[in-house]
Amino acid sequence: MRVLKIILIAATVLVLAVIGARTLFGVQIGEFAFKAAVKSTLGQNALADAPDGLTVVLVGTGSPLPDPGRVGPMTVVVAGDRVFIVDAGAGSGRRFGELRLPWTNVEAVFLTHFHSDHIDGLGEVMLQHWAAGGAQAPLPIHGPDGVGQIVAGFDAAYALDSAYRIAHHGADVLSPSGQGADAVPFTPASTARKVYDRDGLSVTAVSVDHDPIEPAVAYRFDYKGRSVTISGDTVKDPRLVALARDTDILVHEALNADMVSQIRDQLNANGQARLAAIMNDILDYHTTPVEGAEVASEAGARMLVFSHFVPAVPSRLLYPAFLKGTDDAYDGPIIMGEDGMAFELSASSENIVRKRLD
């Protein structure tokens, strides 16, 4: 009993000491912590130790439905030290910076389609490419026909902001030639076609079915014998299966129809018929997790990584329910993608190394 009293007294003294130190030295503690954080994060490149080959980073794995742990869709593909961005959903530009990815190495953006949740972070990406990356030329944005209208709209929306920043910082700091973006359109087809081929990296695109959204495409990146295929938004589509043949990683969108149906039914029960109708409509132009697993199996993909989750899955406790039935459709590794996940595909091995950047 005496020992217990001593322990309780010691614990109380320790707590009071911590509280007192925080009160007396709160400013100093805060200044020390901030200085340490600045030193350990600014100027750091999370890809500095990446092997030669492909690195795939899930910057944003969310969808239009709010999820506190996920920003809008963005998948980054790194070939050697060159950075390519696929889609740019809300918040993804800031998350890119949080993950200490290098804006100076960004060469281009590829858009899968023009739904708002895949492009509403594009302005931030264009700005950071210029301001943080020190760009001397506009950011190339590749996409199916219509990408020119998207780029022109963002350029117009940011024209005043760009002028303000040049006036404030000066042309020596922010080169006027580096602001904005240049559209690089291509006409998609039902058979895969190469849309980028430079310095050993090839990017192939094929049309996918996201009706009534057209055009919509999936992309495959190949570099030094390694590959990643990114589905974009689509129903289960044999053209995607063909594109992803023997790919190392298939990054695929996923909608759990049972969960969405429960949300729809509850909205109807709450008298929110309009929102219920929207939830019902989205059921017919996405891929379920089981269908995504079937695509991976039929394509012979070595790993399946789900992203763009509908509905939101804010807790890992929900993962087994979201993935129900997928193990019966695909016998390879299935990953529930999270913001900050990275996958290294070294050119000197066949391994897939998973890590976190956050």
Image (cartoon, helix red, strand yellow):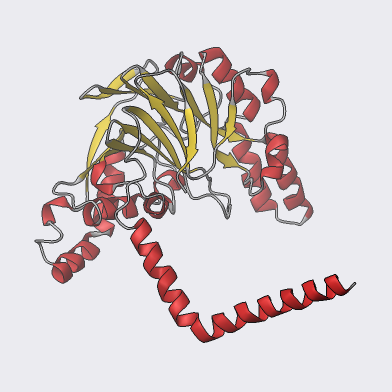
Tell me the residue at 9%/61% (across/down). 172
Tell me the residue at 71%/35% (across/down). 320
Tell me the residue at 32%/47% (across/down). 45
Furthest residue in direction right, as rendered: 1
Q: Nearer the viewer, residue 159 or 104?
A: 104
Please provide percent x and percent y for residue 91: 43, 54
Q: Which of 240 and 60 is in front in this view?
A: 60
Q: Can residue 218 be seen in this view?
A: no
| Above or below for 118 versus 334 | below
Please provide percent x and percent y for residue 296: 55, 19
Q: In which quarter of the image is the N terminus?
A: bottom right
Rendering quarter of residue 288: top right
Please provide percent x and percent y for residue 83: 30, 38
| Above or below for 119 versus 349 | below
Q: Which of 79 and 290 is in front in this view?
A: 79
Please provide percent x and percent y for residue 5: 84, 76
Tell me the residue at 33%/55% (across/down). 124
How many labels, in total?
Answer: 0
Furthest residue in direction left, as rendered: 172
Is 294 left or right of 356, judged from the image as shown?
right
Is 324 left or right of 58, judged from the image as shown?
right
Is 321 left or right of 139, judged from the image as shown?
right
Furthest residue in direction front, as rendered: 2
Q: Can residue 83 be seen in this view?
A: yes
| Above or below for 358 versus 241 | below
